[in-house]
Image: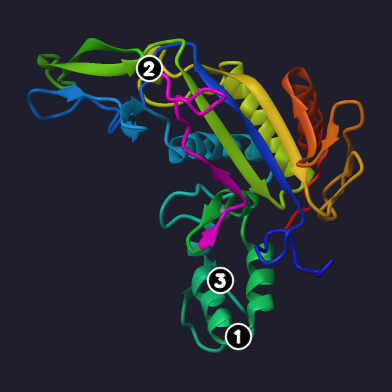
Amino acid sequence: MSGLPWSSHSVILREAVFEGYLVADSPLRIGVGNEAPLGSAAHLAVLRIKLNGKLVPYIPGSSLKGVFRSTAILLANQKGLTVCSGLSEQTCMDREYQNLNDRGTERKTLLKKIQMEMDEGNVINAIRLFHERACLLCKVFGAPSFRGHAEFCDSYPVNEDGDVQDVPVGVRAGIAINRRTGAVRQYYRVEYVEPGARFKFSIRTTNLPNYALGLLAKIMRMLSDGWVRIGGFKTRGFGEVRVEGLHFTASGPTVQGTKMLALDEEDVELDLAGHVSSTSRGLEASGDEAWAVLAKLEEVWDRVKFKPK
Ligand SMILES: [Zn+2]
């Protein structure tokens, strides 16, 4: 192995993919803006995309990623792991970097420091610096100037063969109330995707240690069990989805036999024997076996003890 930490994109240690269908169990609202609009003639349409000539609702990868990251913050905090909010200007990259060897009082962020190392050709230093100073979630989900190690693809309403499926949509009337006066401000219409709609999702990861895959697995289970919802109007019961047709694939130099090796000193090796089959794509598991793989990964997350930094 090259000795580069797993957060480096210059080394391929493994790829792991979670895919399947997100099936709406309640109305689903993925649109632009979740609040009652202030303008007139309000109609809140769901987000649509043109697929094979059909304009259909979809779930952008950024929506799913946002839900995963915000849930991951809660789970990390439960473990006492310090992570950033991931919000603009509040990531680990925006945090002040202090170096005792630096002269003067000039303030610089971690991002600035990393860019300086890159400019000077010290790529390895830059990689190490990021690995040491950025939180787990910046490594998994990304940070300014850094592509994360989990890619959330857009989820489209397609079947196994890739054919575009019709998505039933409905419209509900709502009222916006002036919070101060209590007077009805205006009526508006909210468009939503009807329960039963199916969206094919795919989360593709590179180099994630077993505990980080376990974190994603845990969130996927929470999503499927209704603890985590997606989209808008969650307080009105919108946004429940379940995961169907789950499929897990893992491949790469740190996947050996049925084992997924540990990728850092906090990680734990995992043997998936009995739940996976070896195919040309690597280790694969579908349906109940895929959920069993997720359970094993979740166990790694539950047990991992992070060293205080
Ligand atoms: Zn961070």
Callout 3 crowding tier (Cα within 10 Å): few <14, some 14–19, many ≥20: some
Give whichever of discs 1 and 3 has the lower sequence position.
3
> Pointer 3: what residue?
97
Rounded to the nearest angstrom, the CA distance separating label 1 from label 3 is 19 Å
Mark nearer the viewer, 1 or 3 = 1
Q: Is residue 79 visible?
A: no
Q: Residue at point 28% right, 32% down?
A: 33
Q: Can residue 186 be seen in this view?
A: yes
Name the kind of residue labelled 1 in the image.
Gly
Callout 1 crowding tier (Cα within 10 Å): few <14, some 14–19, many ≥20: few
Q: Residue at point 13% right, 23% down?
A: 42
Residue 200 place in picture, x, y as percent: 53, 27
| Label at residue 167 | 2
> Pointer 1: what residue?
121
Name the kind of residue labelled 3 in the image.
Tyr
Say what secondary structure mark 1 lies in. loop
Mark nearer the viewer, 2 or 3 = 2
Q: Is the magenta stretch mostly helix, strand or loop?
A: loop
Give whichever of discs 2 and 3 has the lower sequence position.
3
Callout 2 crowding tier (Cα within 10 Å): few <14, some 14–19, many ≥20: some
Give whichever of discs 1 and 2 has the lower sequence position.
1
| Label at residue 69 | none
Quadrant where the image shows the C terminus: bottom right
Q: Residue at point 79% right, 51% down?
A: 252
Asked whether mark 3 lies closer than 8 Å to ligand 1, one says no
Is residue 272 left or right of 46 when viewed as pictured? right
